[in-house]
Image (spheres, rainbow, N blue to C red):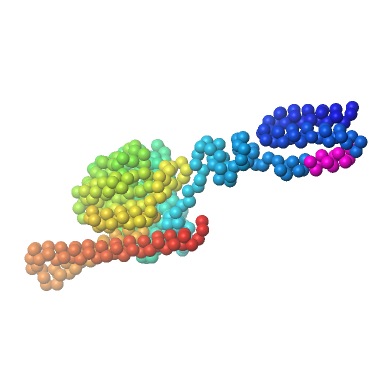
Amino acid sequence: MNALSLGRTAAAKQQKLLAAWRIPGALRAFASETSSSSPSDSNSNSNSKSKGQTRSKTEFASRLKNGPGFADFVGGGLKDPLTTAELLAKVGTAAGGRDRARVRLPQWLKTEIPTGGNVTKIRKTLRDLKLHTVCEEARCPNMSECWGGGKHGTATATIMIMGDTCTRGCRFCSVKTSRAPAPLDPMEPENVATALAAWALDYVVLTSVDRDDLQDFGSAHFAQTVRSIRERAPQMMIECLTPDFLGRADLIEPVALSGLDVYAHNIESVERLQGAVRDHRAKYAQSMFVLEHVKKTKPTLLTKSSIMLGFGETDQEVLQTMRDLRTAGVDIVTLGQYMRPTKRHMKVHEYVTPDKFAHWESVGNQLGFLYTASGPLVRSSYKAGEFFIKEILQKRSDAAAAIAATKASGSSSLAAGSENQLQSASSSATTASMRDIAATIATEERKKIEASSSFSERTPL
């Protein structure tokens, strides 16, 4: 068999292999051209086999160097090679049309990892007494500042009672869910009080999972925990962030009258988005009723609620929600950025800017809230807000003590009208002082955000 026959046989085998492996057209054409050139070279140099092989290798290397590139295989038959940006876009389209561009977290939402002596101490006590905090369960970004005492020195923790498993499934929350959680721990009220007394905290927030599996939804357990803390640490200020108790007044009242200082219940989002954000058993009107009924039950009790932004709400809806809260008698409102805990939870529609949060702070003051905490990292249990509330309660106590001292120091014949004037003057002075404190805290938070933003501009991500 001569060299021509051998070359044709080799070319035929190569074509079969290429077809079997379904190599893209650009490479197949290139290989065919290379193969077809080999027999002619071999035929013309049949007497110089080594010389022909050298020429064939040189020819192949030249064709390979100038042959098809990566763009020819993903270009879909395009004549001109694709650019890098076009290639990346094409890969994204081929993967199902999803936008694969990663949205970076804004610099103002980045915080330090929680560390420090007090943080370690609190964590150890939690593990020893089998207690839970919403700070850890909900992955709060302010944990280091709150547990460590922060700039204002008001060490705070948020204890989650009634277990770590909720009977509801809100789309923003990372707490575990189940229709049948574990039974309540009857020793939990005492364990919580023991832990808090050992921590030497100034302010504690008690919150809980929803327990729709219980006959009273956990109302009695909540109230008993407050009473136990009050016995062990009478100087500690207690805030309760409660469930809605399905809007039952007979279950709201025991908690409101248990000895706490602040009653909080979160509205979470604007009315239109309630069904998308919260569990179907949580209702906008139902939450408003809880806050309103607390104020009727004990008018002197501070009430508080929180709104998360970034779900896709409009400015008008946020404004209406704030008005509804004020109508319900709410004293304190907090607004913060929703941050998606995991990929299983509701997506962030928008990262609201610090300027917009500053706007809502101004609106809250205009609407008459005693204090408005508004910022990207603000949460319902917010460090600066708790410092502020502590100041309110202390000044109220000081005003009451001043009135009592005035009456006991020989002014027992103080007329009722004069006493009312003194109380009114003390209240006005306290309110004015609170406004000053609120303005100072807001200024400090804005400076912190501006410093983070300027650092982001100097440091490439």
| Residue at screen point 19% across, 68% down | 402
Left/right of residue 122 with respect to residue 318 in the rendered view? right
In this rendered view, identify the residue nearer to me: 116 or 45. Answer: 45
In this rendered view, identify the residue nearer to me: 190 or 71. Answer: 71
Q: Position of residue 450 (x, y in %)?
A: 40, 61
In this picture, is 322 found above or below 423? above
In this picture, is 414 found above or below 385? below
Q: Which corner quadrant of the image does residue 74 belong to?
A: top right
In this picture, is 399 found above or below 332? below
Secondary structure mostly seen in the magenta stretch: helix
| Residue at screen point 23% across, 66% down | 398
Left/right of residue 152 with respect to residue 329 in the rendered view? right
Left/right of residue 266 with respect to residue 145 in the rendered view? left
Q: Position of residue 172 (x, y in %)?
A: 40, 44
> Which segment did they paint magenta?
49-59
Can residue 346 be seen at all in this image of the molecule?
yes
Farthest right residue?
Answer: 47
In this rendered view, identify the residue nearer to me: 76 or 97. Answer: 76
Q: Position of residue 63 (x, y in %)?
A: 74, 41
| Residue at screen point 29% across, 62% down | 438
| Residue at screen point 48% across, 48% down | 103
How many marks on residues? Answer: 0
Q: Position of residue 196 (x, y in %)?
A: 37, 58
